Image: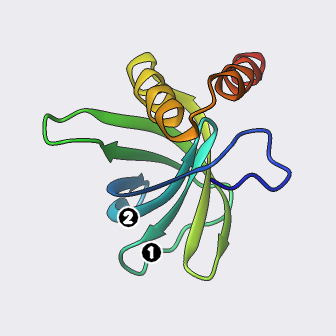
Amino acid sequence: MTSNRRQFSRIRFESEARLFLPTGEYPVEVLDLSLKGALIRPAEAVFANLGSKCTLRIRLDESGVTIRMECTLIHSQKGLWGLACREIDLDSITHLRRLVALNLGDEALLEREFGLLTRT
């Protein structure tokens, strides 16, 4: 877990996912997640401007459980993209919250972050 001046803890979570941009659908690798976004690595050369809107779909298991986030590209550096979550559905936030809880191991910290999320 890393935090460096962040309101929301990031958990290391390596998984394949799909990124949907206006130009198409692209495979990406998720490197870490938080309640407010993700750090990803596109699997191929993809171009998008900072501020581009996109959808990130992360498949959690073989049963088809997914986290779906509507995001904005907020930084791109050395082949890594930072995505800020703009919108997330109830099922996805429930799965994400559980995933973060399991990885943080600190229920009080998770509750504080979830409280911050509901106020933003």
Q: Which of marks 1 and 2 is in front?
A: 2
Q: Position of residue 35 (x, y in %)?
A: 60, 35
Q: In which quarter of the image is residue 48?
A: bottom right
Q: Where is residue 117 in the image (x, y as percent from the top left)?
A: 70, 24
- Which residue is painted at 18% across and 35% down in the image? 64
Q: In this view, does 4 lie above or below 113?
A: below
Q: Which of marks 1 and 2 is nearer the N terminus?
A: 2
Q: What residue type is labelled 1?
A: Val
Q: Which mark is residue 46?
A: 1
Question: How many discs appear?
Answer: 2
Q: Where is residue 99 in the image (x, y as percent from the top left)?
A: 44, 35
State the SS at label 1: loop
- Label 1 – label 2 distance at C-alpha: 10 Å
- Which residue is painted at 45% across and 17% down in the image? 90
State the SS at label 2: strand
Q: Name the residue under label 2.
A: 28
Q: Which amino acid does label 2 sit on?
A: Val
- Which residue is painted at 43% across and 55% down in the image? 21
